[in-house]
Image: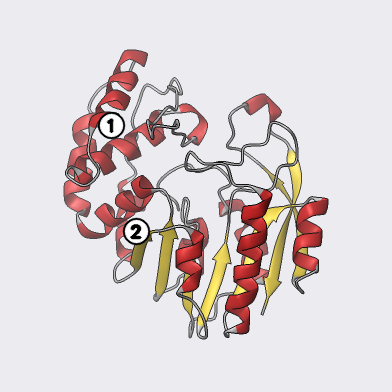
Amino acid sequence: MPIIKWAGGKTKLMPFISHHYPHDHSCRWVEPFIGGGAVFLNMFAQNALLADSNPDLINLYRTIQRQKTNFINQVQNFADKTFVEKDYYEMRDRFNKTCISGQSLQRAALFYSLNRLGYNGMCRYNSERIYSVPWGKHTELKLDLNKIDYLSFRLSGIELITAGFEETLAATGEGDQIYCDPPYDKTSKTSFVSYDGKPFSQSDHVLLANMLVDAHRKGAAVAISNSLTSFTLGLYEERGFVIHRLSAYRSVGSKPNTRKTETEILAVLK
């Protein structure tokens, strides 16, 4: 159901996640790393706080929430052509020249279009916050109106914020049900562990785990997905999480020929 491709997407893992961490609809659903939104969409939460540190991602969702028709019209203006490499890079340059505060509708439409046309569902910025994903050799920009309509409907009344996990989790406690899908701990030297132009270190994982424990002590239910490594097992087991394991085939990455099945974990505190 997500409208964009996103690294680490959870659509195919939803039966496993919903089995071990079903949504209690009396609770507010909280996601500090909303990403492609697959978990939120499959949990059918009506009261939710959705956050991400990527302002372009939140701007996209907020635009669809508030200006769905205008967004569709804007993307359709881009979609009425057959794309070649030059067209993609002209669109990327245009996106990088927009100001997110002043042209949020246009930037949202460009961000969506670049995601659909770019290489393998990647989202990557350089150190100067310049979007740098190469062309994915897609010649057609496909606009899925049914998915956009559904997302707009599901986002009605939902709180969306641009924030890091620290700010988001600091505002949680009793009555909240938290699910985290951070950049995973490295399983190899080439593992991709940055989703917004910044590395996500093991120190960040420790801080995140500690903040989840604090939220649980205040009355929240918490769960987090991650790769299976000796570091993550020790991190969560030492803090009392129940560990569930599953195998997942990763279909989004920078090198398609290196995709493979890996074991992931879902760590839960209820």
Residue occupying the point 73% across, 36% down: 260
- Mark 2 or mark 1: name the one nearer the start of the chain: 1
Residue 189 in picture, x, y percent from top left:
73, 32
User: Image quadrant of residue 80?
Assistant: top left
Residue occupying the point 27% across, 54% down: 64
Residue 264 in picture, x, y percent from top left:
73, 53
Which residue is at the front of the view, 169 or 95? 169
Quarter that holds the C terminus: bottom right
Residue 222 in picture, x, y percent from top left:
61, 73
Q: Which residue is identified by label 1?
A: 95
Secondary element at image label 1: helix
Which residue is at the front of the view, 109 or 131? 131
| Amino acid beneath label 1 | Phe
Q: Is residue 126 left or right of residue 84?
A: right
Q: Is residue 122 left or right of residue 109?
A: right
Residue 242 in picture, x, y percent from top left:
76, 71
Secondary element at image label 2: helix
- Tell me if residue 91 comes above or below residue 39 in the rendering: above
Closer mark to the observer between disc 2 and disc 1: 1
Q: Are marks 2 and 1 in contact (CB under 8 Å)?
A: no
Q: How many marks?
A: 2
Whether residue 223 appears in this view of the structure is yes
User: What separation in Å lies between label 2 and label 1 (alpha carbons)?
Assistant: 26 Å
| Amino acid beneath label 2 | Tyr
- Tell me if residue 18 comes above or below residue 118 in the rendering: below
Residue occupying the point 16% across, 48% down: 70
**Residue 26 has which mark?**
none
Q: Give the class, few, some or many, for how many residues have Cα within 10 Å of label 1's Cα (few <14, many ≥20).
A: many
Q: Give the class, few, some or many, for how many residues have Cα within 10 Å of label 2's Cα (few <14, many ≥20).
A: some
Residue occupying the point 25% across, 43% down: 100
**Residue 150 has which mark?**
2
